[in-house]
Amino acid sequence: MKKVLSLSMGSSKRDHVAEVSLFGDRFQVQRIGTDGDKKKLKELYELYDGQVDAFGMGGFDLWVHYAHKVYRFRDASQVIRHVKYTPVADGSKVKSTLEAMSVHFLVEQGIIHPETQTVMIPSATSRYFLYKAFQKEGFKVRWGDIAFGLGIGQDAMDSEALMNLVAYIAWPLLVKVPFHWLYPVKDQDTIEPKYQKAYDSADIIAGDFHFIYKHLPLSMKGKTIITNTLTEEEIGVLKDRGVRYVISVTPEFQGRSFGTNVLEACICAYFGRSPDQISIEECKELFQQYPIQPRVIKLSDEGDMQ
């Protein structure tokens, strides 16, 4: 049995262990959160290096892909700089393959509707391929990076040209700053309702769950959330706030869906290679050979007449 260990800067309350069948193989998957303690996280990577088949990097990104540009986060790189033997996966390849494939599947199945629904992605510049997948299916897509990522304003934006400009100016600088400036790390379990206009501007909220959850309004009546790494408790919160559908693009492992980093780590363990040695085409072929369908949970009948 292959062993996959997801080490996360996030909350230890989300820790979980599961044994799963995937890609015709068996995996033991474990997640350990360090509650924002970067020193402890670094020590855990070095402790388990060579002891497991692959690491998932949670609560952190190592890479961000935007169009044809690739940027590497300094903060994450420093944490794993002494890891020598075990591949480290941050989920980048899953974001650029499975997430996009899932959008097509959901449209094909009639679960989401480009003719009548609008999409908002809080962190679209870090989910570029998801943004383009919705566009390709004919959705109007808004992006919330200026509000959610930089804390400026309240609105989600429509202009892709502006998003391109922001991405190309900001990412070379942002990958050098401490990651917790950009992303909820220590306080992932706390909701601070904010950016109401951005949430209200769309029928579908998609992308990174912690960005979506961190500022969740008191009412999300009739909305669909497409994301990953969900716990049953969080699904309960979404139901209480009126969410119609919650959809995870990553599979459920004994009661919860893990993040893209875990799925990519399983891919690394399956191939016995590091992420940089696995092509996008190989990932797509694997997902075609062993299809992973989105986990669709209907929480409310609100919006059935759309």
Image (cartoon, rainbow, N blue to C red):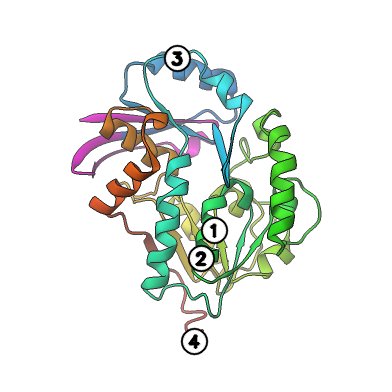
Q: Earlier in the sequence, mark 3 or mark 2?
A: 3
Magenta residues, start to end? 1-28
Q: What amino acid is at disc 4?
A: Met
Q: Main secondary structure of the magenta part?
A: strand
Q: Quadrant of residue 77?
A: top right
Circles 2 and 1: CB atoms closer than 8 Å: yes
Check residue 46 in the rendering and tell me which mark sits there, or answer none.
Answer: 3
Give amino acid for label 2: Lys
Q: Closest to the observer: 147 or 257?
A: 147
- Residue with the mark numbered 2: 136
Residue 290 visible to the viewer: no
Q: Residue furthest bottom?
A: 305
Secondary structure under tag 2 reads helix
Q: Amino acid at mark 1?
A: Lys
What is the tally of numbered marks visible in this picture? 4
Q: Is residue 239 left or right of residue 111?
A: right
Residue 8 in the magenta stretch? The answer is yes
Gap in angstroms between the C-alphas marked 3 and 4: 53 Å
Disc 3 and disc 4 in contact, CB within 8 angstroms: no
Label 4 belongs to which residue?
305
State the separation of the CA atoms marked 3 and 1.
Answer: 37 Å
Query: Crowdedness of circle 2 by 10 Å Cα count: few (<14), some, many (20+)?
Result: some
Residue designated by label 1: 132
Q: Position of residue 123 (x, y in %)?
A: 63, 50
**Mark 1 secondary-structure assignment:** helix
Compare marks 2 and 4 and give the one earlier in the sequence. Answer: 2
For the residues labelled 2 and 1, the Cα–Cα distance comes to 6 Å
Residue displayed at 53% across by 62% down: 238
Provide residue 223's location: percent of width, then percent of height.
55, 70
